Amino acid sequence: MDFTQIIQTVLSTNGIFAALSVGLIVWQSKTNQDRETRYIDTINNITTNISEKITNVENDVADIKDAITRGER
């Protein structure tokens, strides 16, 4: 049974409001999936940026430790 047949069955047995409800559920599901994809992309970007910053801080700390052990100021 394809989507068109489902809509026809719903319309013939339950009326237009049932069809609108089904359409709303389908639309909401699609919208939620798009939003979830954007959230995942945002989280991945933030994670990458933070990881790069942490690496920079680790390198700076290592440089400072080296300078201290050599007696530089």
Image (cartoon, rainbow, N blue to C red):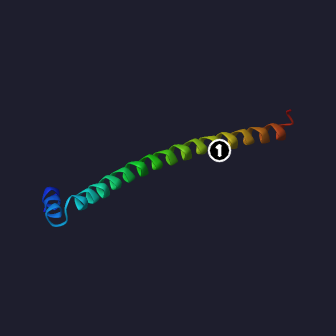
Residue shown at 78% from the left, 39% from the top: 64
Q: Nearer the viewer, residue 30 or 39?
A: 30
Residue 58, horizontal then vertical, whole percent:
69, 44
Residue shown at 83% from the left, 41% from the top: 69
Residue 4, horizontal then vertical, whole percent:
14, 56
* Vertical placement of residue 56 versus 24, above or below: above
Q: Secondary structure at mark 1?
A: helix
Q: Which residue is mark 1?
A: 54
Q: Nearer the viewer, residue 61 or 54?
A: 54
Image quarter (top left, top right, bottom left or bottom right) of the C terminus: top right
* Vertical placement of residue 25 versus 69, above or below: below
Residue shown at 35% from the left, 54% from the top: 28
Corner quadrant of residue 70: top right
Q: Nearer the viewer, residue 45 or 27?
A: 27
Corner quadrant of residue 15: bottom left
Residue shown at 38% from the left, 48% from the top: 34
Specify whether 61 is left or right of 53. right
Assess disc 1: are there few (<14), some (14-19) or many (≥20) residues with their C-alpha within 10 Å of its C-alpha.
few
Residue 66, horizontal then vertical, whole percent:
78, 39
Image quarter (top left, top right, bottom left or bottom right) of the N terminus: bottom left
* Vertical placement of residue 73 versus 19, above or below: above
Residue at the limit of the structure toward the top, as seen here: 73
